[in-house]
Amino acid sequence: MRVERLGQDKIRIFLTFDDLTERGIEKEDMWRDIPKVHELFNDMMEQAYQELGFEVSGPVAVEVFALPAQGMVVIVTKGKTGFRQEKEEEYEEEVYEMEVTLEESDLILYSFRDFEHMVEAAHRINGMLTNGGSAYFYQGKYFLVLEEVDLDQERYHKLIAILSEYGEATPTTVYVLEEYGKVVFAEDAVKEICRHFL
């Protein structure tokens, strides 16, 4: 579980599938209102408080983005509360109301420490893909974004295994890359990388 601050009232938490498995939670459980998921949320808020001093009370908006290969990205935003409401909350113990939004993404997003690693991965997966996604440079790393990968389960897992060999699944969203990253290849990135780099 990785926690990072996005703003004064907003944090992002990245959960791997291992984080969920350790707690006996299936991906589908995140959509259900069950005690295990509440415990997970409490653990996330505890870690956010310890690492970032992010304290939650009152209304919070929770956005959960399920990523097929990487796990889940959870964005928690504190709601704006009036002074009177805050006064009343002082007497309540750890009360917060959650408004949960769930989105599932078919994007596969991997980061690579250097360009050579991305080039090697591209050469290995080139034959498996019909379209090659996009590539970005952001905060000293290279990112490969693949959308709508139409593969059977076995080949899909092979693709993920190859990408994991050279890079790592990342909680960075494509929206962050589009807004703050530098575009290396806007489209057909895998084919373009293979065409230009050996």
Image (tube, helix red, strand yellow):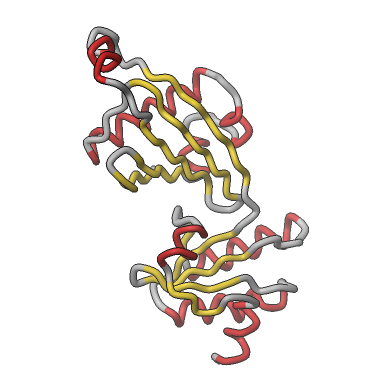
Relative to residue 118, is residue 91 drawn left or right?
Answer: left
Q: Nearer the viewer, residue 119 or 91?
A: 91
Give residue 132's position: percent from left, percent from top. Answer: 65, 74
Relative to residue 96, is residue 185 drawn left or right?
Answer: right
Q: As displayed, is residue 91 above or below residue 69?
A: above
Q: Quadrant of residue 43?
A: top left
Q: Which residue occupies 26% across, 17% down?
A: 86
Q: Which residue occupies 65% across, 62% down?
A: 147
Q: Quadrant of the C terminus?
A: bottom right
Q: Quadrant of residue 40?
A: top left
Q: Which residue occupies 58% across, 68% down?
A: 162
Q: As displayed, is residue 136 above or below residue 109?
A: below
Total numbered labels: 0
Q: Nearer the viewer, residue 49 or 83?
A: 83
Q: Which residue occupies 29% across, 21% down?
A: 82
Give residue 17's position: percent from left, percent from top. Answer: 52, 43
Give residue 137's position: percent from left, percent from top. Answer: 43, 73
Give residue 166's position: percent from left, percent from top. Answer: 49, 70
Q: Quadrant of the N terminus?
A: top left
Q: Nearer the viewer, residue 18 or 193?
A: 193
